[in-house]
Every structure is written in C-alpha cells, then in structure tokens.
Image (cartoon, grey):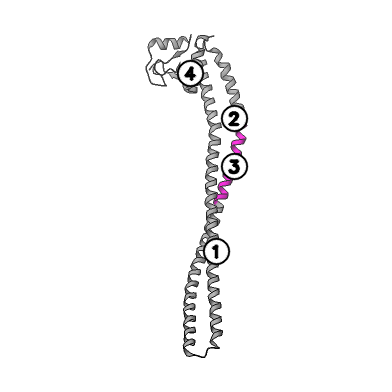
Amino acid sequence: MPATVDDLRGLHDLHRRVKALRDRLESGPKTLAARMRGLESRRAALEEARTALKQRKSDVQRQELLVQSQRTRCDDLRIKLNSVKKNEEYKAIMNEIAMINKDVNSKEEAILELMQGVETAAAELATQEAEVAKFAEGVEALRHDIESKAEGQRAQLQELEAAITESEAVVPPDDRERYRRSVKGKGDDAFAAVDRHTRACEGCNQVNTIQDISELMNAERLVFCKTCGRIMYLVED
C-alpha cells in the first residue's frame, strides 16, 4: 500500500516526538552533570573559606601568645627592678618595659582588627554554607526528578519507536532503502512539508515543480526534494 499524505505527515510527527523525547532523555543527565560540577566548585570554594577562617583564628591566637609572652617579660622585669642597685640599670629596665608596653598596645590593636575580620569571615562562611546546602538540595531534587521521569520516558520511547516501525510499512519497497538512509542521517529532519500553493519545500524553501506537487498528491511513491533530499509531503489544508 503506497504512503498517503496523512501517513507521511503522521510518520514525520512520530519522528519529531521521538527526537524530542531522546533530547529530554539526554539533556537531563547533561544538566545534572553541569549542576554537579557547579556543586563541586561551590564546595571547593567553601572549603577554601573554612581554611581561610582557620588561618585567621590561628593568626589571632599567635598574636595573643606573643602579647602574653611580652606581658610575662614585663612582669619579670618589674620583679628584677626590686634587686637593681644602679640607677643606669634601673633606667634601662624601665625603658625596656616601656618599649614592650608600646609594642603590646600596638599588637592588641592589631588583634582587635584580626578578631573583627574573624567575625566577618565567620558570618560570610555561615551564609556560604547555607547557600551551598541549598544548592545541594536543588541538585538532589533534580537528580530525583530526572530519575523518576526517565523510566516513563524510556517506555514511551519504545512505544513511539514501535509505532514508527509499524507506520513505515506504508513506504513503497522501491523507496525503503533511500528512506532508511535519509532517516538514519537526518532523523526527524528527513521530512519536509510542502504548501501546494507556494510549492516551497519547508526544509530548504526551494520551489517545486507542478509535476512534483502532482506526484505528492497522488502519493504513489515517496517524493524527495531535488535540492535538500528531504522526504516531502503536502501540508494539511
């Protein structure tokens, strides 16, 4: 039985639906992979922020230990003053104590700045952790959505492919080899609708001859566009 206009139109529609379904099945994992890369990047940045915060805290502790050490030195020097007998030595110790106290004051100011930096970094880290956690939840939700839909999509794809195989029975035997090559190479783009009034191929806009339109109307064989090679059929009036 030769293919009718409706047969070819329906066959093209089936190929379009298969293409759209395959695209969805392929795009889901690709989108998930991209989101996973984004998540890993965010986690790496988060780990860097945690390390930076630890370093800030370590800097504060190191400066506090230095200050404590200097204060201990001052205490030792004050005790030493009690046993000093020479005025020059007394003055030298007092000068050293003064220098140490000056340095301590400077370090304490620096420590305050460092502590403020720690507080700011800690707040930013908390925000970043919340954002990463929310992004991870979104990735997991996407994974679940893709996996839950994939089984149904694969089943639907099998049904459509079976429908295509059944519908291809209308392709004339003499045209089947060329039809298979065309569909294998172009998929749903192997077909093109033609308006009987403009006679233009939808695929390449080439105007067909009146003879081509006549053959399309008779539908005794497949008519391929002489310019782009697509399988043509008349659009529905």
Question: Is residue 205 shown above or below 77?
Answer: above
Residue type, mark 2 in image: Gln
Which residue carries the number 2 mark?
153
- From the viewer's side, name the closer residue of 120 and 76: 76
Q: Mark 2 Cα within 10 Å, few/some/many (few <14, many 20+)?
A: some
Dot 3 or dot 2: first in sequence order is: 3
Estimate the spatial distance between the alpha carbons at disc 4 and disc 2, rounded to whole Å: 25 Å
Which residue carries the number 3 mark?
141
Dot 1 or dot 4: first in sequence order is: 1
Residue type, mark 3 in image: Ala
Residue 49 in picture, x, y percent from top left: 52, 55
Residue 29 in picture, x, y percent from top left: 56, 36
Q: Mark 4 Cα within 10 Å, few/some/many (few <14, many 20+)?
A: some
Badge 1 marks a residue whose secondary structure is helix
Estimate the spatial distance between the alpha carbons at disc 4 and disc 3, rounded to whole Å: 40 Å
Residue 175 in picture, x, y percent from top left: 49, 11
For the magenta stretch, what is the residue range? 131-152
Q: Nearer the viewer, mark 4 or mark 3?
A: 4
Estimate the spatial distance between the alpha carbons at disc 1 and disc 4, rounded to whole Å: 69 Å
Q: Is residue 182 magenta?
A: no
Dot 4 or dot 3: first in sequence order is: 3
What secondary structure is the magenta-colored segment mainly? helix
Dot 3 or dot 1: first in sequence order is: 1
Which residue carries the number 1 mark?
58
Residue 103 in picture, x, y percent from top left: 47, 75
Which residue carries the number 4 mark?
182
Estimate the spatial distance between the alpha carbons at disc 3 and disc 2, rounded to whole Å: 18 Å
Q: Is residue 135 magenta?
A: yes
- Residue sitting at x 51%, y 13%: 177
